[in-house]
Each structure stands twice: as structure tokens, then as C-alpha cells.
Image: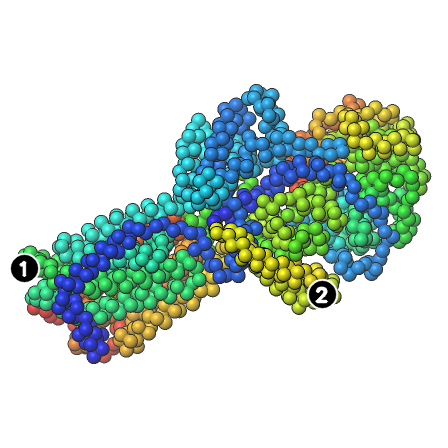
Amino acid sequence: MDAHALLFGRHGIAGPNSRAATYGRRMRTALRRFVLACLWAVSLPAAAQHAADIDPTLAPRPAVMAPRAATSLLLDIARAGEHWIVVGQRGVILRSSDGQHWQQMPSPVDVMLTRVRFFDDTRGWALGYDGAVLETRDGGRSWTLLRFDPQWGKPWFDVLFLDAEHILLAGTNGALMITADGGQTWQSIDTPVLEDGPNLYSLAALGDGSLLLAGERGFLARSTDRGTTWQRLRSPYSGSYFGALPVGEQGVVIFGLRGHAFYAADLRAAEVLSAEAAQALREAALDPTAAAAHINPVSEVSGWTRLENDDYESLFGGTVTADGRVLLFGMNGHVMQVDLTSRRLHRLPAAPESNLNAGRLAGSDLIVVGTAGVQRLPLTR
Amino acid sequence: MAGAAISGPITERILRVVEPIVYGRRHLTHAILIALTAFFLVQTFRLEPDAGWLKSVPLNHPYMQKFREYYRDFGGANTVLFALIQKEGDIYNPHFMDILQKATDDVFFTPGVDRARVMSLFTPNVNYVENVEGGLSGATVIPPDYQPTPEMLEKVRSNVAKAQVIGRLVTNDQRGAMIMAELLEIDPRTGEKLDYREVGNYLEQLRAKYEKDGITVHIIGFAKIVDDMTKASLEIAAFFGLTLVITGILLWLYCGSFVLGLIPLGSSIIAVIWEMGLLRTLGYGLDPFAILVPFLILAVSVSHGVQYVNAWVDEIHAGRSNYDASLETFRRLAIAGTIALATDVAGFATIYLIEIQIIREMSINAVLGGLAIIVANKLFVPIWLTMIRIKNVDAFIARQNKRDAVLDKAWWWMSGVTRTPVAAAVIVVCAIVAGWSFWAAKDLKIGDALKGVPEFRPDSRFNQDFNAITDNFQIAVDIFKVIAETRPNGCIDYELMEQVDRFAWQMENTAGVQSTLSLLTFAKLVYQGLSEGRLNALVLPRNQYALAQATALVPTSTGLLNDDCDALAVFMFTKDHRAETISHIVDEVKKFNAANREDFFARHPEVTPEYCDRKYAAFQAYKKAHARVFELVDQSGIDAEAQRAASAERDRLLAEYEAFDQNCPVNFALATGNVGVMAATNEVVKDKESEIVLWVYAVILVLLWLSFRDWRAIACIVIPLALVSQLGYGVMATLDIGMKVATLPVLALAVGIGVDYGIYVYGVMISALNEGKSLRQAYYETLRSTGKAVIFTGATLGASVLTWLISELQFQIDMGRLLLFMFTANMLGAIFVLPAIASFLYPHAPRDQAQPAGDRPAS
């Protein structure tokens, strides 16, 4: 045998980046199979289960206390009083007072956590895969499991506190739930709008209290009654929206795949998608020739303005700063500032060499999270 | 002299048998020996290089057995990395791109290369992929219509970023690019086993062709290691000639006669010829370790030859004829010398206990060499001495006397070491040195700690290339692989894959591990790609179909999974390959494996550990039968019947295994990867280290007891030896030489050779004491005869390994440094420490006098 094959074998040579390239090769096959991928079983979340009911083989595992937690894949950041809280893969929850030194907090699950939001300085939720919903009542130091549904296995993507008792959860395949008692009991929101079961990536409450739900393949829906009923909106884009940020009283910025972003100055003016139009879209999606003909994914829809972007990097998260600036975060270290007057996205010089999922402003610095963990960077160079 | 000490009825009897052979029919004996030498000389020239890497690892260690079990799956191809790095500016200029394209074409024609797998920016297998609306899109990095225009070069730059090849095919700072190639063991053109030297020469030609105009070329790879090592080994063989010349000159000076100097030198050359001829005759080849043995044989043989010639000259001084002088010397020294050599041989033999082939062959080789020395020194030398004609004997003796007169003063001064206060001072110094070495030896490391490939010296061209490549690319070279054994088609079972993924995370958070890589790393990326590229989709999907799809897209050629997907390789890129780093990782792997089992059984009360042990045994049996089928297919001369039988057996065992339908915990088996091999080697070395040394000493003690039957003899000889051995550890720690495959045998060999000095010095001294002389007088006389030879020999031995220090191979340098120290220290131990100890053990010897009494016997 050759020995140093170990050293220099095809595996040997693998570096941290090589997986990406091998992956690249594979993706051609992936392309062919992509349609198949979309046909995965669609299942809705089972009824809320108490941990005790769970099959012992699926019982939650506490997160490993990991020295590399702060430099591993992290997905979201939130402010809890005087502290920053960051969540990410393998149940990692980190806490910091300065955004530079992070301490891992014990977490009852080791599933990927996709979102963290705080209602006030002390009470917050973190959500993720296996239908996990965690709650803290001490500013993120300790966490308890509110919901856990490994049988369903899928992730929640967003949470919205309407008030202390009324909370909305949005997740995979059109999973949308509401609680009226702070998380004790849950109700699935049954609306024809979610009939196709799109992934619901973002829930936003506008200045006027109306809600916008954004998701997979141009899914947009609006509610003016605190989430009870929903109205689907016509989308200016056929790709996915990964986030929605309220701007002013009625305004909203939505953004997502390939750096596409749109602005509605007054969401009330946005065109509604009729049931017939929705049906037509559905049929077009099933017809491959029609889908292929649909070359330009962006279309003119009244009420929406396209925000020009020179780059094609997907944008996954965003924040509205105290002084009203809108910042978006995406692939390959892209940090974009939204300029609503010139209707453009400008790339900011803060450019870490990693993929970003979310970020917040901390004084004159940015704290960003993504594939390289959490980093604090100066906003300007 | 020594012979006098070792005399008795047995010795007499042996001499009575041997003497007539050597002396009675010496011309016949000589002719036979010459004929044999000629035969061995022919055999020596038939010796072939044999640098098999498998020889240098402990094949019977459990890690290595796992390694071999999965070699077919995870053994790995052998890659050549060819990097072009520009001194200034980035690669996106027409000149560099042109060079890269041409170099890619040339690498394509490397002997044995797998052309489909050559990779550089210019090969069609390098693509970028993007998530777009409703799917994925991709293309080659260099567009098919590439022309060196500024616009096109900008497009290439942007594609390179998208393809995520920076750090792999392009340097981190984009000043250089890489061409990767894989070699096939069997050259597809010729159907013959790949000749690494041919590959190495071709690559060197390419280097010469492209290394100009501000571009440097760096080449690494297994083929390059083999080629460079073979070349370096041959270089060392050439040093042997240099060593012969140095030794010859030293002998000439020492003996005061060119012809006389030729006798030990000639006999030593004959010993080496016999050694190498015997090696070939027994079917062994010449590996980088074996190449060192002739140096040792030369050194030991010269040492004995010098003793012999020295004694013979003394006899000539005493006025005997050369024949009588030879006979007298033979009577005195043959038995003592043979016993000393037998001790050496026993020392060499003990290193056979280390279950590493290359060391075992070195042991056999050295034993053969030891036997060859006995023949050369106890047969050739006595015969030659009867034949030699020293032209003007009186003038020769006069010259000797003149020189001795100068030296005698020095010997007398040195013999002062036997005076009680001096002896006490020496003992105190020794105690301090021993204390220091005990303290220093705590830092003694197991294994290698140097950066780069441990075989080569840090400043060798290979390691320079190695550093240039590892500094500029993100390429990990210290790899520890653990095999996660699941079950056939285990890749679609979330429960099993989740354990592997959790293992990878646990290990990534273990000190010494920088990152990990497994099938699941890729599976997550595939799943992310199929999920619009979202970062929150970098997970293992619970859904079986999604998981199957994600894992099915990763080919077995990545070396991360085998065909049946019943075993995954988990790669850990370690921060270095130091023994502490490795052993900590090993402990953590074992800990995780145990904890994972416990957790699994707690979650599955219906599955018992016994059930899983039985299932694992069935799995092993099936795997073995499976491997057997492949073995038969590989063999030439296909036996269809045997193949059918093997397949049937395999299928039967598979059915038996599949009857165990409950899942069992994943077994994380140690270990492969270069660091995994080091882990096994380190464990063997650490395990055997004290055992070997104890055996060497046990053998020495027994032989010494048989020779002298006096505990004082043992104390005088063994204490200095043990002191030097202990000091050796301290010196190793101080010089940063690790305890490893190359240095462990040195410790044993050095003890074997070191004991010679003690035996000769003690033997002569005790016979003088027995004649009623004072200790100082006895030691003075010892120094004048044997001591002089011992000092000379120590210097010669040291000189002979000096050439190793300029080797390109780091382990030869380490062995050389260590041997140089051990030889010198042992010599000093025998000359100064031995008499100091004796002064306390023989307190009743007659009182010292102020002047040397008497002189040489009747000059």
C-alpha cells in the first residue's frame, strides 16, 4: 500500500474548502434531481406534544458545550436587555455583553436553532428544527423546552410576539400556529392561502399593526386581524423571500434569493392575488414548458418597487437600525444598505469572507452571524 | 588480558577445536573464506532497494488492522500536487494563465496519471454552481471560449470566487494556482506497476521547465516522497565510501603502518560484504534503515580489528614472530572478542521484539552483520596476521616506542582516576548527570514533532515545497481518520448518521482537532443546495428520502464512504502530529464511542449490548468474506469455482448478519490517516520502549555473568552503560529528538556496542589486578593497550556516523546524532567511570605508587 496516500491521498488533500468544490461537481447531478427534491412528502406539524409523550429514541439531547461554538455556523442574533443572544447549529446558544466575548448557555436541545427573538429584556424564544421552541425568562441564561416534535422533524423559521400572550410561529410547509396563552396551548391557523404549503421564512409586523408573511417562491400574505385571516398578495418576484422588514407606518422591505429586494411604501396599496390568479400560478408551475418560458423572474406589480442590486448574492437576514437605516446580510460576506430614495442596495465595505445569515448594529460596529460564527466588525473601514 | 580473565576448561576446549582450523590449515580455510566472500559480493550487487512503506508501520496493531480492513475503501489514491506561484501580482494575467494551461497539459502526461481526475482551473471538471430561481445553474470556471482578454480574465476571476476553489486550486491570496493529479498504482499505458522514480524524474523536468520568469514551482505527493527518499538513501550509500576513506586514514595513523591499518579495514569491508550478501541471500532488500547497518558493522568490526591488531603489535614488541604473535593474540582475544560480539548480537536481536517490519529487518540485518564480524575478525584477521610481513620490524617498534613515550605520560595522568578522591569526584559528577537526565527525560516526546513530512529534514526541498503549499493553500496534511461502522446502506438511516454527525462535532471541539470532514459535511451542503442555498438548511434532514438523496450524491471516490455505505470515514484535521495531540484525540474517540453506546442502549431498552456484540461479530465475518471475494477477483488466473464458493459464503454470512434486524450503535473504529498510523506507531514504541531496554540489559547481564562470574565485573561494566542510556533520554529530550521507530533501535544498538568497551577495559584491568598490581598500575597498563584502542574506536565510530548528519532524511540525521552521542559517551564511560567504580569495589588492591612501575614486557 502506499502510505503517504494517507497524507496525499485524494482524501488527504481535502482542505476545508475542497468540500465546496466537490460539491460543485455533484451539483450537476443535483440539478437533474432538483425537481424530485421538491416532491418530498409534505406533512403538517402534529399536535403539540409534551416531552413525556415523546418516543424515548427521539428524546431531546442537550447541546454539547462546545469550545468552537462561537466560530461554527450561527444563524440569528437578538438583543436581551444589556446582552446579545446568538443561536445556531446543534442547539448552540451564546450570550455576550460586548459582542466580542461569547459564552455558551446550556440548551435542552441539540437541534439547529434558526431564530431567536425577545419579547422584553428577559423573556425570549428560540426556535428551530424538530419543531423545537425554547423559552427563556432570565434574559437568555437558562432555557426550557416549550415545544418539541421530532416526529414532524421540521423547522420553525420565525416567531412574532403580538403581545405577552399572543404569539405566532411560522415554519416549513405552510406551518403557521398561534397561541393565546403565552405558549401553553396552540392552534394551527387554517387558511386557504397556505394550501400549497410554502415554507414561511419571515413574519413581520408593520408600523400600523398589520402583518406580512413572506416565504418560498414569491409567497406573500397579509393579515390585518392579528393573524386570524390572511390575504395572499401578488408577488413581484417568482423566487423565494427570506426576510421582511417594516419601514415606517405602512412600509416594508422584502428580500431573498439572488439578492432580489423590493420595497412597498404602503402595503395597503399592494396588489392582492385572487384565487383564480393563484390557481393559474399553480398550473404554470406544474407545466415545465411554461416554467422554462418564464425567463425573467421579476415582474411589475403595483405597490412594489424593485431595489436595484449589482450583486446576485442571496440575502438571508436584515435589521432596521435605531436611526432608520435598513441593512441586509447575505452570501459571501455581503452587507447591503438599502437606499430608499435612489431605490438601490449599496454594498458596505464591512466584508467578512463568510456567508452571513443575520446581523445587528452595535454602536458603530456590526455584529454578524453566519458560517464563520459570530463576528464583530467595524461598519466602515 | 581479556582472554586471561575469560579462561578455563571450556575456553581451552573451544580453542583446541578452533585453533587447528584457523592456524593448522590456514591456507585452505582462507581460500574457502575468500570464495564465500566472492559469492556474497555477487549477492551484494544483487541487492535491490525496497522502500515499502508498510514495513515501517506496526501491522499487527489493532488500528493498523482496521486500516488494512478498510484499505480498499479508504486507502486512498495517491495524489500529486503541482503548484505554480507567482512572486508578484495575481494570477489573472495572460502570461500566468498561459503557463498554467501548458503545465496542466504537461501534468496530464505524467506517467501513471488518472487523466480523468487531473484538476486545475483549465480542466472541465472544475465548475461553479449557483442557486437560481427554481433550481441550480452552473458552468466551467474557464469559459469554453476563453481568450486572454481583460474582460475574459475578469470573468474567470468572478467564476473562481463562485466555484469556491480559492484555497484549493488557487492560493488564498490568488497569486498562484494548483494542478492536482492522481496516480494509478498500475500504469494504464503499460499495465505495469508504477515506477515512482520515473514519475519523480518527469515532475523534476516539469519543474525545470516552468520555474522561471518570477514563477516558482512546488511539487508534493507520495510519489515525490518515494522518489526523494530513494535518492537520499542512495546518497547515504555513497557516503559509505567516504566513511571508508576516513576510517582508513585514522587506522593508518593509529597503527603507524599502512599495511597494518589495512587489516582491520579490510576485514571490516569483508564483514560488510558478508552482511549484505547474507541479507540478499535471505531474500531481503535494502530500505532506508537497512542502509545504515553497514555503517554500524564497519564501526564495530573496526573496533574489534583494532583491539586485535593492537594486541598483536604488543606481542611483536615482546619479540615474537608474526605467526606466534597472531596465535598468542588469538588465544587471548578470540574468546573474549567473540563473547563481546555475541553480546552485541544479542542486543541487536532484542529489537526484533518490536512488531514493525522495518525494525525487525534491521534487527536481522544487524545480527547477520554481527556474525559476519565474528568470521571476519576471528578468522580472517588472525590468518592475515600470520601472513603479514612488516618490513623493518625494529624501525616499526622504534617508531611505536617513540610515540608511546609521549602518550604514556598522558595515560599515567589519566589513570589517576582510580585514586579515591578523584574517583569520588567522578562518581559525584555522574550522579549529578544522572539526576539531570532523569529530570530532562520528562520532556522526552514520543513520535515526531517537526513541521512537514517527518522523513525529510525541515530545510529539504520537499519540505520547502510542502511549506509553500500548506502556507498558500488551505490544505490539511495531518489527517486522523476514524472509521464509523454502521450497517449496509446505513447512509439513509438518520439515527445512524446523526451519531456520526454528533461524533464529528464532538471531535471538532476536542483540543488538537482543527476541523472535521465526513460524508455528512457534504450531505448537508447538498441539502442546503437543494434548499435554495439557505444557511439554515445546513442540517441532516430527518426525512429518509431527503437524507438518501443528500448522501447518494456524494460519490465513493471522495473516500468518505464505501460502496455498501456500511462504513464512513470521519476525517479529523489535526493541528500537528505530536504524540500528546494524538493520544488526547485517541482518548476522546474512545470516550465518545463508549458514551454513544451507553446512550443508545438507554434509548433502546429492547436492544442489548450482547445482541450488538453478536451482530458486530456477524458483520465482521461478513466483511471478511466480502473482502475474500474481491481478493479472488483481483487474483490472476481466475478460479471460477473458488469465486462462486466465496460469493456463496459471503451471501450466507450476509443473510446471517441481516437476521439481526435491530439497529445497533455506530462503532467508531480507530484509525487510519497518516496521524492514525502515527498513533499506532507511537503506541507500539511507547509500549515496547522499556521492554526492549530491559531485554538488552538482561541479555548483557547474563552474558557478563557467564564470562566473568563476578558481581563486581557486572557493576563496573553495566553502571557506566546504564548511565549513558539514561543520559541518552535526557539528550534526546534536549535535542528535540522524539522516541520513534528510528531512534528506539538506536538505544538498543548503542548499548550492544557500548558494552564492548567495558568488556575489553575491565578484562585487561582485572587480569593485571590478578597479577597483584596496584589498581592504578593495572589501569595504567590497560590504558596503554586496550584503552588506547577504545579511545580510538570511539572516535572512529563517531566519525563513521558523522556522514549521516548531512543526509536529506531526517530520521537518519536523528539516528546519527544519537549514535554519535552514545558512542562517545560510552567510550568516556568505559575510560573514566569504569575505573572510578572499580576503585571502590577493589579497595584491597595494593597501594598506589607515584610512578608507573615497570614498563612494557621486555621491549
Q: Earlier in the sequence, mark 1 or mark 2?
A: 1
| Position in image of residue B674 (x %, y %) | 51, 51
**Disc 1 residue type?**
Asp
Q: Farthest residue in the front direction?
A: B641
Spatial CA span between label 1 and label 2: 95 Å
| Position in image of residue A20 (x %, y %) | 63, 39
- Residue at image position (48%, 51%) is B636
Q: Is residue A46 above or below residue A208?
A: below
Q: Is residue B751 above or below residue A270?
A: below
Q: Secondary structure at mark 1?
A: helix
Q: Is residue B800 visible?
A: no
On residue A151, which mark appears?
none
- Label 1, on which residue? B394
- Residue at image position (21%, 74%) is B14
- Residue at image position (43%, 28%) is B212
Q: Residues within 10 Å of mark 1 (few under 14, many from 20)?
A: few
Q: Is residue B628 above or below residue A262?
A: below
From the viewer's side, name the closer residue of B761 and B313: B313
- Residue at image position (24%, 51%) is B244
Chain at numbered mark 1:
B
On residue B607, which mark appears?
2
